[in-house]
């Protein structure tokens, strides 16, 4: 069974600090990795995705992927109270052509303390 | 970016009635859409995969006769909760896969309250 594991948190960081969110996945053939942010009572919104090993930066967000360790992380620099939300890691396993079903982790709740 | 629109955003109904929720991809064609349910403080639960022009694929434990899914066009999927009961009260979210962008976009969600 394909699984995506995240620490449920809550992860508390002071305003201005770096928040580090981690995710591991079981399917070694997974090809794409996504980070979503979900505010309470709202639907998830895509922050960024990563396909290749290494780092990918977008503003204050950096996604890091290590396929050998089956590990993907999201760093949030200069954390703001508005970043307080649940962060969902999602993985697209390889299931052949035409399959687009992401496997989601249960999410990590981040709390940025002013 | 691509937009997925979900309607209604909130619905309150009496027990025993049926409720239809629509999910539209506004600027891309979506051959595959997904329906999720999320209870308060819980994680997303995939209910079914909706494929345009064919029957939906339901996850284990989801009653296909209770949660009717129709994906009649490349931009619209509907979820009908039939004979709704209070335990069906939840946040229902759809998502659509934009093949060209290689991204999954979510609708705004529909909060169903069954009295």
Image (cartoon, rainbow, N blue to C red):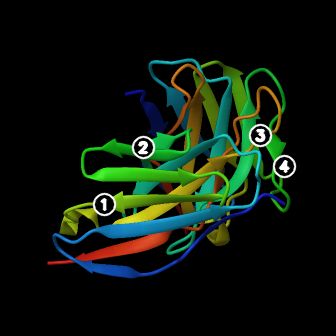
Is residue B36 in view from this perspective? Answer: yes
The label nearer to you, 4 versus 3, is 3
Q: Residues within 10 Å of mark 3 (few under 14, many from 20)?
A: some
Give B97 or A5, whichever is nearer the viewer.
Answer: A5
Q: CA distance from mark 4 to mark 2?
A: 36 Å
Whole-number angstrom distance, CA of label 1 to CA of label 2: 12 Å
Q: Residue at x 78, y 57 (%)?
A: A2
Q: Earlier in the sequence, mark 3 or mark 1?
A: 1
Label 3 – label 2 distance at C-alpha: 19 Å
Q: Mark 1 — residue?
A: A76
Question: Residue under mark 2: which chain is it in?
Answer: A
Residue linked to disc 4: B65
In depth, the one of B33 and A27 nearer the eye is A27
Q: Secondary structure at mark 4?
A: loop
Up-down: is A100 above or below A20?
above
- Disc ID at residue A48: 2
Q: Is residue B13 visible?
A: no
| Marking on residue A65 | none
* Circles 4 and 3 on the same chain: no
Q: Is residue B113 above or below residue B19?
A: below
Locate residue B91, reporting x and y percent.
Answer: 53, 59
Marks 4 and 2: CB-CB under 8 Å? Answer: no
Q: Which mark is residue A94?
A: 3
In the rendered image, residue B38, in percent from the top left (x then y), is placed at 57, 63
First of labels 1, 2 by sequence position: 2
Q: Indicate the chain on which mark 1 is placed.
A: A
For the residue carrying disc 1, how many other residues have a C-alpha within 10 Å: few (<14), some (14-19), or many (20+)?
A: some
Asked if labels 3 and 4 touch by Cβ distance under 8 angstroms, the answer is no
Front one among A85 and B6: A85
Callout 4 and callout 1 share a chain: no
Which image quadrant: the N terminus of chain B?
Answer: top left
| Left or right: A51, with A61 as reference point | right
């Amino acid at each position: 069974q394909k699984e995506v594991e995240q620490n449920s948190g809550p992860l508390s960081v002071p305003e201005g600090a770096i928040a580090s969110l981690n995710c591991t996945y079981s399917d070694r053939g997974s090809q794409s990795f996504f980070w979503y942010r979900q505010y309470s009572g709202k639907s998830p919104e895509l922050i960024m995705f990563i396909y290749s090993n290494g780092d990918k930066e977008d503003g204050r967000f950096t996604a890091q992927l290590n396929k050998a360790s089956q590990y993907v992380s999201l760093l949030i620099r200069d954390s703001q109270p508005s970043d307080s939300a649940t962060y969902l890691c999602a993985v697209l396993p390889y299931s052949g052509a035409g399959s687009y079903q992401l496997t989601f982790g249960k999410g990590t709740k981040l709390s940025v303390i002013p | 970016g691509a937009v997925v629109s979900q309607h209604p955003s909130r619905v309150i109904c009496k027990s025993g009635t049926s409720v239809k929720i629509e999910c539209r991809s506004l600027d891309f064609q979506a051959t595959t859409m997904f329906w999720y349910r999320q209870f308060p403080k819980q994680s997303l639960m995939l209910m079914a995969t909706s494929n345009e022009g064919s029957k939906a694929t339901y996850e284990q434990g989801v009653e296909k006769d209770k949660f009717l899914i129709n994906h009649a066009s490349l931009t619209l999927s509907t979820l009908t909760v039939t004979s709704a009961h209070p335990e069906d009260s939840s946040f229902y979210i759809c998502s659509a896969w934009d093949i060209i962008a290689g991204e999954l976009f979510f609708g705004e969600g529909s909060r169903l309250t069954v009295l």
